[in-house]
Image (cartoon, helix red, strand yellow):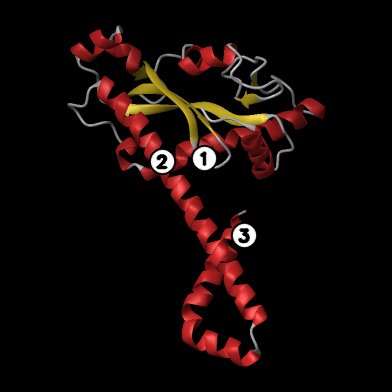
Amino acid sequence: MMINGNSQREFSNRSKAGFDCCVGAVDGILIWVLQPSPSCCRESRCDAQNFLCGRKHKYCLNCQAVADCRGKFLDMSVRYPASTSDCIAFESSALYGRLTNGLLAEGLCLFGDNAYLNAPFLATPYPNVSSGHMDAYNYFHSQLRIRVECAFGMFVQRWGILRSAIPKGISIRKTTAMVLALAKLHNFCIDQVDLEETNILSMTATILFVLCMSTISSQCCILRRFGNNVFKTLHKASHICRKS
């Protein structure tokens, strides 16, 4: 789990929520599976009904994840059936053990909703408030938590296999391994997009510098020869700037 001062400041700056202590947002998502076989149930040490989500009327796995400001997953755990609450699933994860042993520097914490218990390393909203400073805190708190919800949205949209039940024949153990592998690929894709955007902005800076330092006749010559590429690059750069 990569947490440092830079990621702390980056989360605060990108979220625009005014907190400077948040290094990630935690939440849970259900991974849709078919009814587990008897052998999978024995391996998981629970029966098929434990995998059934009453709200969705589907068999699922409880996936706990922490996302950063870009939607990358800093940590993910897929160990328990759908009947397990987010709080229990999170507190039974390896990450929770590291957090209780001082993983985060003093003053840093994760943000989560009221499904979790407030702790020195985990900030949750104030319960049952509708006005005043506490309500304002809850509003900005939610602006940080939405990052992990967006990460889940990108994750499921990116990998179509997660939008339906995991095909029959893929065991619970293999499903867990697959989801974790897809999370790593998800992070890789985000890094590649960031790298591409950095290259585009660098090219834009070079183009503008060359045009500014050139004479009018040279500028016309450059635009006649490379006009389409120049305008495409500038258009992409303006789109990136609007996003940020």
* Within-10-Å neighbours for mark 2: few <14, some 14–19, many 20+: many
**Residue 174 place in picture, x, y as percent:** 26, 25
Residue, x 61% and y 25% (percent of image)?
A: 110
Q: Which residue is mark 3?
A: 242
**Residue 1 place in picture, x, y as percent:** 51, 27
Up/down of 81 relative to 1, above or below: above
Residue, x 39% and y 36% (percent of image)?
A: 184
In depth, the one of 152 and 57 nearer the eye is: 152
In depth, the one of 34 and 11 nearer the eye is: 11
Q: Are marks 2 and 3 in contact (CB under 8 Å)?
A: no
- Tag shown at residue 71: 1
**Residue 131 place in picture, x, y as percent:** 79, 28
Of labels 1 and 2, earlier in sequence is 1
Q: Which residue is mark 2?
A: 186
* Within-10-Å neighbours for mark 3: few <14, some 14–19, many 20+: few
Up/down of 11 relative to 87, above or below: below
Residue, x 57% and y 59% (percent of image)?
A: 240
**Residue 41 place in picture, x, y as percent:** 25, 11
